[in-house]
Image (cartoon, grey):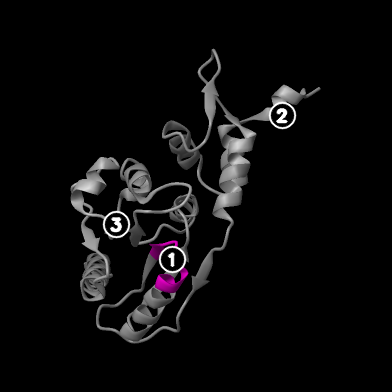
């Protein structure tokens, strides 16, 4: 019979199932403190169920997803871009600008860092654009968590913030390979990042096709 104490804690696998993420992602979240956990004498993690519920509440706040109609572009395949920003007006501006570019980009937007981590695990975006001052989990901690996870491979990250470099360093600092763009948002620079990713995808696909025909 399961006791009330047993119900207080769950396994990492059960936490991953409830959150809809991989087992490895749940393990990483316990390691960085996003999920409250302890280890048994046998070395198995036990996660506090309340912390899983908290992340689910925060992450389920409001996930907006839009898939624009495909448009022709010389760069080829589509890419997926995740924007993590808690300013609803700025999120609308992002969507307007991305749509005006008429590039083959699928845009996902979330409003906090916990929600962003969940979407990274579920959607595996090609590019994440993240504000640093976010509720629940700030952008610096979010970026550093992803930097040390399997999801970093093949995904670019760009930070956008009104903070200067000294203020960002005081928060823990960004990895050297994550550029920091100032606010107001430099949309021309972000478009260059997207076009570079599209061209890279196009080149990789054609190289694979040539290899298959050899």
Numbered disc in front, either 1 or 3? 1
Residue that carries the numbered disc 2 in the rendered image: 7
Asked if the residue under mark 2 is in contact with the one under mark 1, i.e. CB atoms within 8 Å, the reply is no
Of residues 102 and 32, the one drawn nearer to the viewer in this rendering? 32
Q: In this orientation, does residue 116 appear?
A: yes
Q: Earlier in the sequence, mark 3 or mark 2?
A: 2
Judge whether residue 174 can be spotted in this image. Answer: no
Image-based side of 167 in relation to 55, left or right: left
Picture coordinates of residue 146, whole percent (x, y): 36, 46
Q: What distance separates the C-alpha of mark 1 from that of mark 2? A: 37 Å
Residue at x 29% of width, y 59% of height: 161
- Of badges 1 and 2, the one in the foreground is 1
Q: Is residue 113 left or right of residue 173?
A: right
Q: CA distance from mark 1 to mark 3?
A: 19 Å
Tell me the tag on residue 17.
none
Q: First in sequence, mark 1 or 3: give its number.
A: 1
Dot 2 crowding, Cα within 10 Å, few <14, some 14–19, many 20+: few
Q: Quadrant of residue 63?
A: bottom right
- Report, in whole angstroms, how far the alpha carbon at label 3 lies from the one at label 2: 38 Å
Q: Which residues are magenta?
A: 82-91
- State the residue in front, 80 or 179: 179
Residue position marked by numbered label 1 in the rendering: 87
Q: Is residue 134 above or below residue 87?
A: above
Q: Quadrant of residue 16?
A: top right
Would you name the residue on which mark 3 appears? 157
Image quadrant occupied by the N terminus = top right
């Amino acid at each position: 019979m399961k006791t009330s104490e047993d119900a207080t804690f769950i396994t990492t696998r059960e936490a991953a199932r409830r959150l809809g993420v991989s087992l490895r992602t749940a393990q990483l979240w316990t390691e960085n403190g996003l999920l409250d956990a302890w280890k048994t004498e046998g070395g198995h993690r036990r996660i506090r169920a309340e912390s899983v519920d908290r992340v689910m509440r925060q992450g389920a706040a409001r996930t907006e997803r839009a898939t624009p109609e495909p448009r022709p572009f010389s760069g080829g395949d589509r890419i997926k871009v995740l924007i993590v920003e808690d300013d609803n007006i700025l999120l609308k501006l992002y969507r307007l600008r991305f749509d005006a570019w008429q590039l083959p980009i699928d845009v996902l937007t979330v409003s906090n860092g916990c929600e962003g981590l969940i979407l990274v695990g579920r959607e595996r975006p090609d590019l994440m654009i993240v504000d640093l001052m976010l509720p629940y989990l700030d952008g610096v901690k979010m970026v550093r968590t992803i930097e040390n996870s399997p999801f970093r491979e093949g995904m670019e990250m760009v930070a956008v913030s009104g903070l200067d470099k000294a203020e960002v360093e005081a928060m823990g600092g960004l990895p050297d390979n994550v550029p920091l763009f100032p606010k107001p948002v430099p949309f021309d620079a972000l478009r260059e990042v997207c076009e570079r990713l599209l061209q890279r995808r196009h080149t990789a696909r054609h190289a694979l096709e040539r290899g298959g025909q050899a």
